[in-house]
Amino acid sequence: MNPQAKLIFIISLMLGTTITISSHHWVMAWAGLEINTLAILPLISKSHHPRAIEAATKYFLTQSAASALLLFSSMTNAWHTGQWDITQMTHPMSSLILTAAIAMKLGLVPFHFWYPEVLQGSPLTTGLLLSTIMKLPPITLLFMTSPSLNPTLLTTMAILSAALGGWMGLNQTQIRKILAFSSISHLGWMAIILVYNPKLTLLNFYLYTLMTAAVFLTLNSMKVLKLTTLMTAWTKAPSLNAMLLLTLLSLAGLPPLTGFLPKWLIIQELTKQDMAPAATIISLLSLLSLFFYLRLAYCTTITLPPHTTNHMKQWHINKPTNMLIAILMTMSITLLPMAPMILTII
């Protein structure tokens, strides 16, 4: 892709995200989301592979449907209340439609079908953008409208997301699909606490972005897309692979790694809100996703491939690791002791 064109698309992504995050009016938020959608489409389909074109088409159709629903819900709310302010979403029917629209934008269950397919058809760098920066504007809208959302609906969707995200990732061999289902189960954790403590949703999202960025960038530097190639990648950069093991376990939420922090705080908040059964269910469902993280970790460093493997072993490279990957990995592993400081910031 032409570097100038790529620069324009990246700037448009930042612009769209900034417009949505900083807007008070529904139409401005909608315009920002549309700019985002149009800017990411060429980045998804840049390889001109049929699967990439299919992914871009699926993405465009679902995002346009979600944007139309979002506009419809805000117009219904304006019709009933005379308000276009994002924080004044007081009409119950409008807030239900809005929840559906944003769930569609994010890929929450039951609107999750497009997400693994789109991620599978995109390059790893575009997959990283789809998993992180493209989720920020919808989550911000949920954050701003959180007082008027329906807690029962969100809790149901969250538990279903954690269940299906874990279940459907179990038998995958494509790493991008595994990361897509991991993202769906993480969204479940963000959605369940949204009504009770929206700041925890944002904290969970920031830490998830940090860990996912580390994983995606590492896989991109090792040029790994499948579990079978991950098995032979340890010869290429052994130290990077060892750190990837820890980052994957952090993404699974194991103590004493960074990923444990949001899960711990969310379970604590849910028990304070007399939602111990929901906390128990979602904690047990996170064991499903722990299984496929362990599978990834096992393929990364713990197992040696059989000597009769059909894949050519990679040459050990002495190329230094990217500074950004080093910083992200360090933060993905070591932020738990800084929990008190993080809590005073949010």
Image (cartoon, rainbow, N blue to C red):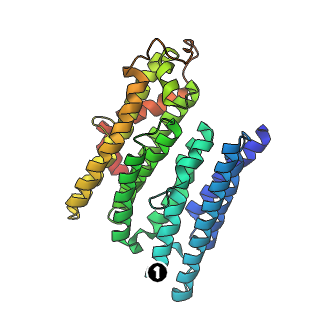
Residue at 38%, 47% (x, y): give it.
167
Quadrant of the image occupied by residue 126: top right
**Nearer to the camera, 158 or 24:** 158
Residue 109 in percent (x, y) is at 44, 59
Name the residue beneath numbered marker 1: 93
**Nearer to the camera, 222 or 91:** 222
- Judge from the rendering whether residue 247 lies leftward or rightward of residue 17; answer left or right: left
Residue at 52%, 24% (x, y): give it.
229
Position above or below: 289 against 62: above
Residue 153 in percent (x, y) is at 37, 69
**Nearer to the camera, 93 or 141:** 93
Quadrant of the image occupied by residue 198: bottom left
**Nearer to the camera, 224 or 95:** 224
Residue 257 in percent (x, y) is at 32, 35
Position above or below: 138 against 186: below
Residue at 63%, 38% (x, y): give it.
123
Packing grade of label 1 (10 A; few <14, some 14-19, many >=20) is few
Residue 238 in percent (x, y) is at 46, 16
The answer to whether residue 11 is visible is: no
The answer to whether residue 241 is visible is: yes
Quadrant of the image containing the N terminus: top right
Q: Which amino acid type is marked by label 1?
A: Met
Q: How many marks?
A: 1
- Judge from the rendering whether residue 185 lies leftward or rightward of residue 26; answer left or right: left
Question: Which type of secondary structure does the marked residue at label 1 adopt?
Answer: helix
